[in-house]
Amino acid sequence: MALATRRFFNTICRGTRSFGALPEGIPSSSQHLINLEYEYSAHNYHPIPVVFSQAKGSTIWDPEGKKYLDFLSAYSAVNQGHCHPKVLKALVEQAERLTLSSRAFHNDRFPIFAERLKNMFGYDMVLPMNTGAEGVETALKLARKWGYEKKKIPKDQAIIVSCCGCFHGRTLAVISMSCDNEATRGFGPLLPGHLKVDFGDEVALEKIFEENGDRIAGFLFEPIQGEAGVIIPPDGYLKAVRELCSKFNILMIADEIQSGLGRSGRMVACDWEEVRPDVVILGKALGGGVIPVSAVLADKDVMLSIQPGEHGSTFGGNPLASAVAVASLDVITEEGLSERSDQMGQELRNQLMKIHQLFPNFIKEVRGKGLFNAVELNSKALFPVSAYDICLKLKERGVLAKPTHDTIIRLTPPLSISLDELQEGSNALRDVMEFDVPKMQKAKHKRVSQTTTNICDRCGRNMDDS
């Protein structure tokens, strides 16, 4: 059985498979799979129509053998690159020994994982979970419990402050903080106990703290807003947040699920301003792209607010996830992926800025830190072409990216991407702007006469305004 397991993983991830086009006349296996998914899976995603069949590093192959460059990295879950050999080795070896104990018993992998997190990030304790959304839910519960026990907030009056444009997942508690109408409409009533503030506005944050500080347990934020379109706060904002949270005795809770683990060019994005949040949430790349792993980090005076029976997860801290997470962290440190992300990100933005200069009417802004980047489009000049349309054309040219808010394209390749691959991705975007966009505008103008607006139910902003 052990040998069979190794052979299986070697086959799917070593890159030795031979690829060739399907004979003419045979229906595309990709299309068949897309049709099956549409027929039998819930329609809660609108994916780019490409099927992943095999991957290695920054490269994806579909069932027909067509090769693509991955410029999304599963929303930063594969920072180390697809099927990294060290991560897979840890997965296979642990899978042959022990996969699950539940937290009803101890296992011999989780304590090693917990110690590694302590040594790397400097927090006393970890509460392990699986998905990022679970990590956020854990942090919310932890903040409330701390607020009642340590800050002495009156019963059932604890408040969490979060930012306009935030994305922390799609659970009910999380969408209760959301400005995304698609995430909130039809799912009410939303949970109480939440206040909103503009991201990057320290003056507004101080005002909310002054007015409600005695009942505020935590301020939850992304150091760089991902789903909002890689929004980077003004210089000094993170330090100001730290000072305000300390002044008003409010937990500073950093959601580093997407921005952390090297993505922004630092181990965590808060390191850009050398601030230490009270609570840090990690996920995505913590599992190396092979298994969901998340973790909430805090010191004992916060973490021990939660006692046995008050929170948990059957799979949280399981030995398989723990072994994979240790290997995933090893890869990030041993291969210097944070530093590499910083350097390669600067190169990518240089390339994108040149494209911006060539097409200033189409591209509004290029922004990012490390390999966490976005191209914001001028929707009026591009009309009726959308960011999704551009991503479809990128896909035809062998580059996979995904839009957000219909006007922004995130470019977040694996941190192991090569300079040649980076240039290939930029070249594809330039060619789409030069050759494909004018054709799409002519074709679509015949069918589309007006745009629709997306006004946020919560704050009244036009979320598509660019």
Image (cartoon, rainbow, N blue to C red):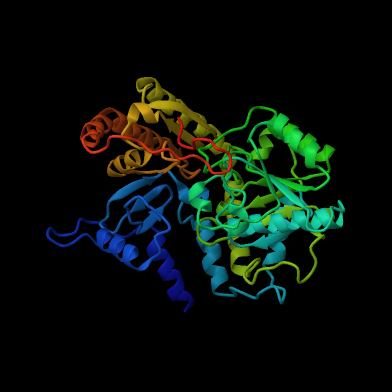
Along the line of sight, the residue nearer the viewer: 248 or 85: 248
State the image coordinates of residue 252 (x, y, percent, origin top left).
74, 44
Q: Quadrant of residue 32?
A: bottom left
Marker count (numbered): 0
- Taking the image as shown, residue 463 lies to the left or right of residue 137, namely left
Does 155 sit above or below residue 95? above
Q: Quadrant of residue 164?
A: top right
Along the line of sight, the residue nearer the viewer: 388 or 10: 388
Q: Residue at x 37, y 52 (%)?
A: 47
- Taking the image as shown, residue 414 lies to the left or right of residue 303, namely left
Does 45 sit above or below residue 449? below
State the image coordinates of residue 438 (x, y, percent, origin top left).
25, 29
Residue placed farthest to the bottom in the image? 1
Q: Residue at x 33, y 56 (%)?
A: 51
Residue placed farthest to the left in the image? 25
Along the line of sight, the residue nearer the viewer: 389 or 182: 182
State the image coordinates of residue 90 (x, y, percent, origin top left).
56, 63
Inspect this view and state whether residue 285 appears: yes
- Taking the image as shown, residue 160 lies to the left or right of residue 227, namely right
Figure quadrant of the C terminus? top left
State the image coordinates of residue 112 (x, y, percent, origin top left).
70, 62
Inspect this view and state whether residue 398 appears: no
Along the line of sight, the residue nearer the viewer: 325 or 301: 301
Q: Residue at x 66, y 34 (%)?
A: 272
